Amino acid sequence: QVQLVESGGGLGQPGGSLRLSCAASGNIFRIDTMGWYRQAPGKQRELVATITSGGSTNYADSVKGRFTISKDNARNTVYLQMNSLKPEDTAVYYCNAEVATTFFTTTFPYWGQGTQVTVSS
């Protein structure tokens, strides 16, 4: 089993900053891509940012230049630094990791439980 535990959500002001963390634990042999997705009320879940095992990053156009994804391989942890927050960033943010549990298996997507981010004055 693999668990992803998110932290760092909460209330942020427009123009302010928040930092999310997600730690993966459990039966982990290898982690490929890790990322953050978000889902606003009444909308589909959407990609925010991803980072590969090699450190390549990908961002949604709506967050480019404002959000930065990074990771600590030794801690199996991914971070999302969110700056210049906007009310439209309000959503539940979910952590995702593509994890192989043994040498012989392919990766499988695991999800965190989600953390609420609300941007409001």
Image (cartoon, helix red, strand yellow):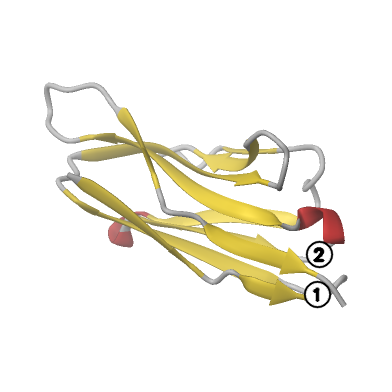
Q: Within 10 angstroms of label 1, few (less than 14), some, or many (20 or more) residues?
A: some
Residue at position x 81%, y 52% in the image? 65
Q: Please tell me whether residue 81 is drawn above or below residue 8 in the rendered image.
A: above
Q: Please tell me whether residue 31 is drawn above or below residue 94 in the rendered image.
A: above
Q: Position of residue 44 (x, y in %)?
A: 67, 33
Give whichever of discs 1 and 2 has the lower sequence position: 1
Residue at position x 53%, y 61% in the image? 115
Residue at position x 87%, y 78% in the image? 121
Q: Please tell me whether residue 62 is drawn above or below residue 90 in the rendered image.
A: above
Q: Position of residue 2 (x, y in %)?
A: 23, 46
Q: Position of residue 79 (x, y in %)?
A: 52, 60
Residue located beneath label 2 in the image: 85
Q: Nearer the viewer, residue 89 or 103?
A: 89
The circle drawn on residue 16 is 1
Q: Callout 2: helix, strand or loop?
A: loop
Q: Position of residue 30 (x, y in %)?
A: 24, 38
Q: Quadrant of residue 11?
A: bottom right
Q: Amino acid at mark 2?
A: Leu
Q: Please tell me whether residue 22 is drawn above or below residue 16 in the rendered image.
A: above
Q: Nearer the viewer, residue 79 or 6?
A: 6
Q: Nearer the viewer, residue 119 or 27?
A: 119
Q: Are marks 1 and 2 in contact (CB under 8 Å)?
A: yes
Q: Amino acid at mark 1?
A: Gly
